[in-house]
Amino acid sequence: MLSINNSSVAIACASGSFKTIFVHGVLSAFEQANIKADAYASASGSVLATAWAMIGKAREAGVNYWLEGLEIYRQTKSMSQVCLGGISYFKANGGKQLFESFESNKSKLYIAASGVTSEEAAKQTQGKQARRLGKKLLISAAKGDCSWVNQNLRLDLFDSSKNNNLALNQDNFAEVAYASTRMLHAWDIPAWIDNKPYIDASYTCLCPAIEMVEQGYQTVIAIATEPGNLYRDLFQQEVIPKQYKQVPIHLIQPDIDFKELGVEFTKATSEGLTAVYQHGFDKGNEFLA
């Protein structure tokens, strides 16, 4: 296990759709250095990167995993299909190991998702109004207006070590992984966990770093997907600090805007994905050094 001053360490990974290949690069550098954390926490696009890291296959999956996702997008123009394809591929090639790791409880996996709390919001988010609502929420986010979220969403943190209604297990992993990624403006397939409506983690949690402090970890490494401030959620009202409740939060983030490399949230080039993965790998090694 990774240990900083003999403390328990959690790695919290940010959202970012295609940009989260940067997270995968960082985790691959950690894996090459034989470093494993006590917990991996994820939001949205970082879910499967953390799952690969949990089973020691981050490097094996590597950039090729993301290039397969890009090919699915080119064929379908559907980010929902990209995510579902990635989940199916992971389950076929790493699911058994992941679920066995849940049983051993050597490391914990956390996945954030936004639970829908009202019947009206459930109709909006899971029906024909979803895309329009998603675009409205992006405008609200640019204005810092989180009133709709405060009224209609809650942050749920699924945990591989729990036995309650937020337990993460073999039966619900695919549902939780997909729900965590589902941005309303660009994902066309609704998300349900145990028949309850959910949407992307980012509306309530961009990176579960503070949540890892609240879970009791004594050191947190937060991996962002953009330069500048790392905010707690999409509405950018609260910056994740370098220290929270006397617990240090170490930030790993890119030096550049990935647009310069041809990678955006729902757009990418093969060359761009390869470059962003390598940048993440380099930043991971830089942090370890």
Image (spheres, rainbow, N blue to C red):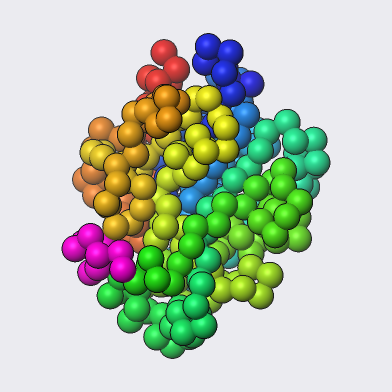
Residue 271 location (% of width, % of height): 35, 46
Q: Left of 256 or right of it: where is 223?
A: right
Q: Is residue 159 magenta?
A: no
Going by the picture, which residue comes out furthest to the bottom? 128
Above or below, comparing residue 241 to residue 145 in the picture: above
Where residue 120 appears, x then y in whole percent?
A: 46, 84
Residue 221, above or below 226: above
Q: Which residue extends farthest front?
A: 245
Residue at 42% of width from left, 57% of height from top? Answer: 204
Task: Tell me if I can see residue 126 in this picture.
Answer: no
Foreground residue among 61 and 218:
218
Residue range highlighted in magenta: 138-147
**Relative to 271, 229 lies left or right:** left
Screen quadrant of the N terminus:
top right
Q: Residue at x 23, y 69 (%)?
A: 139
Q: Quadrant of residue 109?
A: top right
Picture quadrant where residue 250 is located: top left
The answer to which of 274 and 117 lies nearer the viewer is 117
The answer to whether any part of residue 56 appears in the image is yes
User: Which residue is painted at 56% across and 74% down in the image?
Assistant: 197
Depth order, front residue of 121/255 = 121
Rendered location of residue 96, percent (x, y) = 78, 47
Q: Is residue 140 magenta?
A: yes
Relative image position of residue 61 (x, y in whole percent): 58, 42
Q: Is residue 276 above or below residue 77?
A: above
Q: Is residue 162 above or below residue 222?
A: below
